[in-house]
């Protein structure tokens, strides 16, 4: 849905077409607020992969790399070799980290943890290695979008949730009753959420068993080999 359509439909619902008491910039701020909290975050919060993206990370010889600046939730981390082949790393539980802290490897990292804004790699890999983070980003600030720039509203209910919500904020700004508009906004937000949750339920959720796991025991941090 284009930004210009969001603005024109919201202003029509609020009966504010041609009313210059609310600036264009303020209307766009309303769009960004409602889109981020009630359209984007609703889908991202269900654990679905609709907005998933990737970021390439390069090691510098220390135990961590900085997380992507717009990260909301991490999906996974891969080591990427010179040929472009991907090798997934395993997430560590907090109680497991003590076994791997300060360990280094001439090969690559096998495990990761995300703490605050740092992605820790275990064992500490050498410099200039490439890793790839798959993650759900934060909602973008769409207040600066041009009228012909599209917003991914995901579903028809996402579109109506956005338009009714923006109209409601416009009425609040004008100190008018917005109860009906907020009611319609909440109705379509709930339908939007239900769609996102149902889609997540139908996505695959099976345990991944790798060949190196079969018939083997725990990973030995002393020499980075599998031991029984």
Image: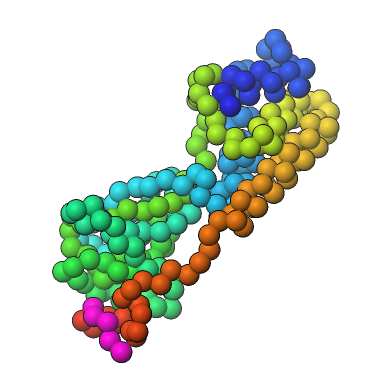
Quadrant for the N terminus in the image: top right
In the rendered structure, the answer to whether residue 160 lies left or right of residue 62 reads: right
Residue 27 visible to the viewer: no
Q: Is residue 45 left or right of residue 13?
A: left
Horizontal and vertical percent position of residue 54: 38, 47
**Residue 15 in the image: above or below residue 153:** above
Q: Quadrant of residue 116?
A: bottom left
Tell which of 154 and 20 is nearer to you. Answer: 154
For the point 21% across and 81% down, which residue is it? 223
Give the vertical position of 44 relative to 144 (above or below).
below
In depth, the one of 82 and 24 nearer the eye is 82
Q: Which residue is located at x 21 percent, y 72 percent?
A: 104
Q: Is residue 82 left or right of residue 167?
A: left
Number of marks in the image?
Answer: 0
Main structural element of the magenta stretch: helix, strand or loop? loop
Q: Residue at x 31, y 81 (%)?
A: 219
Magenta segment:
224-228
Q: Is residue 224 above or below residue 17?
A: below
**Where is 43 relative to 156, above or below?**
below
**Image position of 210 (left or right of 141):** left
Residue 186: horizontal and vertical position, in percent?
75, 40
Q: Position of residue 2 (x, y in %)?
A: 56, 23
Give the colouring mode of the picture: rainbow
Residue 156 rendering spot, x and y as whole percentages: 67, 34
Rendered residue at 23%/52% (across/down): 84
Q: Determine the image quadrant of residue 215.
A: bottom left
**Quadrant of image for the C terminus:** bottom left
* Magenta span includes 225: yes
Residue 197 seen in this snapshot: yes
């Amino acid at each position: 849905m284009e930004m210009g359509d969001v603005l024109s439909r919201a202003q029509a619902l609020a009966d504010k077409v041609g009313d210059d008491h609310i600036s264009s910039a303020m209307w766009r701020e309303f769009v960004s607020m409602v889109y981020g909290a009630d359209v984007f975050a609703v889908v991202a919060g269900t654990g679905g992969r609709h907005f998933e993206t990737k970021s390439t990370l390069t090691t510098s010889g220390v135990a961590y790399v900085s997380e992507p600046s717009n990260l909301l939730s991490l999906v996974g981390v891969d080591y990427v070799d010179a040929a472009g082949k991907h090798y997934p790393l395993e997430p560590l539980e907090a109680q497991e980290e003590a076994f791997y802290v300060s360990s280094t490897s001439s090969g690559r990292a096998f495990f990761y943890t995300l703490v605050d804004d740092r992605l820790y790699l275990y064992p500490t890999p050498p410099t200039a290695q490439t890793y790839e983070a798959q993650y759900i980003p934060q909602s973008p600030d769409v207040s600066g979008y041009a009228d012909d720039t599209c917003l991914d509203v995901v579903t028809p209910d996402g579109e109506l949730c956005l338009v009714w919500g923006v109209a409601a904020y416009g009425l609040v700004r004008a100190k008018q009753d917005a109860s009906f508009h907020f009611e319609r906004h909440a109705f379509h937000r709930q339908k939007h959420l239900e769609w996102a949750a149902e889609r997540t339920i139908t996505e695959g959720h099976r345990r991944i068993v790798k060949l190196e796991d079969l018939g083997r025991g725990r990973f030995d941090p002393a020499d980075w080999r599998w031991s029984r």
